[in-house]
Amino acid sequence: MASLINYIATSCNWIDHDEDVLLTILEEMVGNGVRCETNNFKAGTFGTVTSKMWETIPGINTEPKHIQNKLKRLKEKYSSTYEMMNTSGFGWDDEKKMYCCG
């Protein structure tokens, strides 16, 4: 039970607005050159992103590890979506207004 309480106290619940703010901040930072030669973010970037999130969304419960984890999850979702979109027969059904396999 204590581990569940600890998890809840240290977790961050993301809503669409929070994700939008995060992606906007990351996009701005990439434009400012905070990536290494390996295309990863430089040390300290997640702390800076966290500070900007706090400024933009007062009261948000986020820490650098939350930002890093969220970015990892977004990359996984993007990779899966990219793979599906490039699969033969997968596309937009204009009649149903949704993506489907055909």
Image: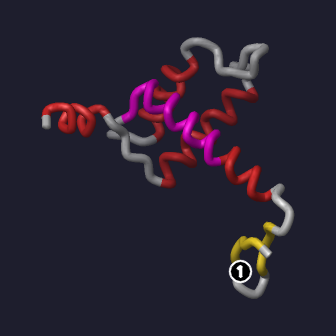
The amino acid at mark 1 is: Lys
Residue under numbered circle 1: 97
Q: Residue at x 53, y 23 (%)?
A: 46
> What colour scheme does the image use?
secondary structure
Relative to residue 102, is residue 69 drawn left or right?
left
Q: Reply above or below: 23 against 86.
A: above
Q: Residue at x 69, y 19 (%)?
A: 34
Residue range corresponding to the magenta coloring: 62-77
Q: Give SS at disc 1.
A: loop
Residue 93 x, y percent position in the rendering: 77, 79
Q: Nearer the viewer, residue 97 or 16?
A: 97
- Quadrant, the N terminus: top left
- Crowding around mark 1 (Cα neighbors within 10 Å: few <14, some 14 to 19, many 20+) is few
Q: Reply above or below: 91 against 4.
A: below
Relative to residue 87, is residue 76 drawn left or right?
left
Relative to residue 78, is residue 61 drawn left or right?
left
Q: Nearer the viewer, residue 24 or 67?
A: 67
Residue found farthest to the right? 88
Residue 94 x, y percent position in the rendering: 78, 82
